[in-house]
Image: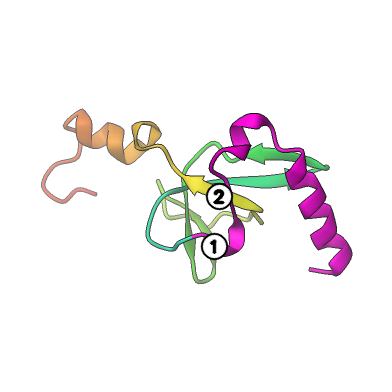
Amino acid sequence: MTKLELMKVKDAAKELPDHFVMDWQTIASAPFDRDLEVAVLDAGETHAVVFPCRRVLRGWVSAETAAPVAIHPTHWREWKASNSALFVALSSGIAQGGDL
């Protein structure tokens, strides 16, 4: 990224809605070992991705399908387990005997 692009990201982050401000972290600190909620910039606006993602060496994948996701997030936070498809499957008894 150029210096100008980084400045745009920093400026846009200042305008994150209140629900983003609480526990969002910069993307550079995103861990590789858990489901994450990530935020992306699109046309100067910040949006949270609606499904859990995982950081991998080659970029980002959907935590639900392991399919690559072509995104460039700017911020992350823990995915709320109660919203996770894996959590729902486990709590409803769908996932059994190593199906996941």
> Disc 1 vs disc 2: Cβ atoms closer than 8 Å?
yes
Residue at screen point 65% across, 30% down:
18
Q: x, y (%) of residue 89?
A: 26, 35
Amino acid type of the residue that numbered disc 1 sits on in the rendered structure: Ser
Give the left or right position of residue 63, taking residue 92 as reference: right
Magenta-colored stretch includes residue 4: yes
Q: Which residues are magenta?
A: 1-30
Q: x, y (%) of residue 4?
A: 88, 63
Residue at screen point 54% across, 70% down:
58
Give the left or right position of residue 82, taking residue 58 as reference: left
**Other-residue count near label 2 (Cα within 10 Å), few / some / many at <14 / 14–19 / ≥20:** many
Asked which secondary structure carries label 1, the reply is helix
Residue occupied by mark 2: 76
Residue at screen point 67% across, 47% down:
40
Asked which secondary structure carries label 2, the reply is strand
Residue occupied by mark 1: 29
Splitting the image into 4 quarters, where does residue 83 fall?
Answer: top left
Q: CA distance from mark 1 to mark 2?
A: 8 Å
As drawn, the residue found furthest toward the right would be: 4
Quadrant assignment for the N terminus: bottom right
Q: x, y (%) of residue 45?
A: 78, 39
Of the two numbered discs 1 and 2 on the same chain, state the one appearing first in sequence.
Answer: 1
Magenta span main SS = helix
Splitting the image into 4 quarters, where does residue 3 fall?
Answer: bottom right
Amino acid type of the residue that numbered disc 2 sits on in the rendered structure: Trp
Q: x, y (%) of residue 63?
A: 42, 50
